[in-house]
Amino acid sequence: MIHLDTYGTLVAATLVLLLGRKLVKSVSFLEKYTIPEPVAGGLLVALVLLLLNQLFHWEITFDLSLREPLMLAFFATIGLNANLASLRAGGKSLVMLLLVVLGLLLLQNAIGLGMAKILGIDPLMGLLAGSITLSGGHGTGAAWSKVFSERYGFESATEVAMACATFGLVLGGLIGGPVARYLVRHSATPNGTPDDLQDPSAFEKPTVGRMITPLVLVETLALIAICLSAGSHIARQLSGTAFELPTFVCVLFVGVILSNLLAWLGFYRVFDRAVSILGNVSLSLFLAMALMSLKLWEMAALALPMMAILLVQTLVMALYAIFVTYRLMGKNYDAAVLAAGHCGFGLGATPTAIANMQAITSRFGPSHLAFLVVPMVGAFFIDIANAIVIKLYLLLPVFPALMG
């Protein structure tokens, strides 16, 4: 076994990003279907590590202590970049996307339970292969698997949850680009021309160079640190209460309040150029670490029934994005980018959704609406809606042991 410490892991993550960029530029298939660079590089490294493990019984492990701070820093920048006035302007679209997402949550759990019944496995496994891990991600999966194992005796709940969430993270990054490309080609603007002529915002064109000063960078780092500190404190205070929320949601919320409060007081204006640079760096490194550290041999150990459920969920996600998300969100370029984002957080996580959308907007053009509503729905509202949906499903008669 080879173990890379914090510095070695950081070096490996940067090399994965450079590899991903080279792959996307060199392999026409990856560029054609707009596969995000961290996904391309990270998945290739994970496959290489799988071969080393199976052929030579080698295992390379990583010190992932930086992964959570990078994820939280990314969500902090999303919050700092959120303008409440703009959110009010996109309110109708935000509500519509929330309804679309709610429909998928219900559908994912129905599929999980239906497939579990057909395959003759524990219905709790069906729920874990539903919205708990797919729309909920690793955090929600870990929380509910603990409940399933401790309270209801489902001993392998944690392993199943982590495997399902990991599977979703990979597939969410792979299907978003092809789905969006198909929708753009069949939209009213097949060349990908955006529906407005506004300049792209900070997160829509991550490869564009931006001039910032050292002072601005330090000020922005301070704001991000405040978000991480205050958000983590709030999450700890809410833990175990009816208002418990994931830490990243609290961090994002603090970022929204902080940036808008400072602007309202006229005390300080957040510089979106510095926020976008630090946000994109955090996002890329987080995804690289998450994907390069996948232990695919453990995923291969998934029971065949679980793999069957997850493959059906992936197919349904793609079809739902095409026939529901795209159509209800307007059947235009913005809707196509939104569909790519929905594939990202509907199977994996909000960082995957942003990476999917950036891959599309970098190639075709900006989509202000998508980058306005997806982070808020994917990182905030979906966790609240998902918790309610899961608790409602647990009231079904198929779970008699859970009703006592």
Image: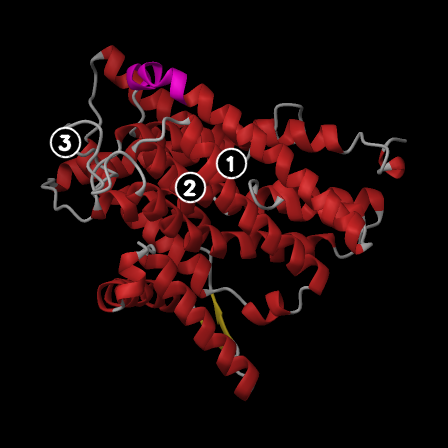
Choose the circle earlier in sequence order: 3 or 1. Answer: 3
- Residue 225 in view (yes/no): no
Q: Secondary structure at mark 2?
A: helix
Q: Residue 44: image x %, image y %?
A: 40, 70
Measured in 3D between alpha carbons, the distance from the residue under mark 2 to the one under mark 3, in whole angstroms, is: 27 Å
Camera-side residue of 28 and 249: 28
The answer to whether 125 is drawn above or below residue 303 in the figure is: above
The answer to whether 191 is drawn above or below residue 96 in the figure is: below
Q: What amino acid type is highlighted by mark number 1?
A: Thr
State the quadrant of the C terminus: top right
Q: What residue lies at 27% left-to-right and 59% top-to-bottom? A: 31
Which residue is identified by label 1? 247
Measured in 3D between alpha carbons, the distance from the residue under mark 3 to the one under mark 1, in whole angstroms, is: 32 Å
Choose the circle earlier in sequence order: 2 or 3. Answer: 2
Q: What amino acid type is highlighted by mark number 3?
A: Asp
Q: Is residue 5 left or right of residue 100?
A: left
Task: Report which quarter residue 211 is drawn in.
Answer: top left
Q: Are marks 2 and 1 in contact (CB under 8 Å)?
A: yes
Q: What residue lies at 33% left-to-right and 38% top-to-bottom? A: 337
Query: Which secondary structure type mostly characterizes the magenta part of the structure?
Result: helix
Q: Residue 43: image x %, image y %?
A: 42, 65
Q: Which residues are magenta?
A: 84-93
Q: What residue lies at 65% left-to-right and 60% top-to-bottom? A: 307
Residue 199 - label: 3
Q: Is residue 323 left or right of residue 158?
A: left
Which residue is identified by label 2? 72
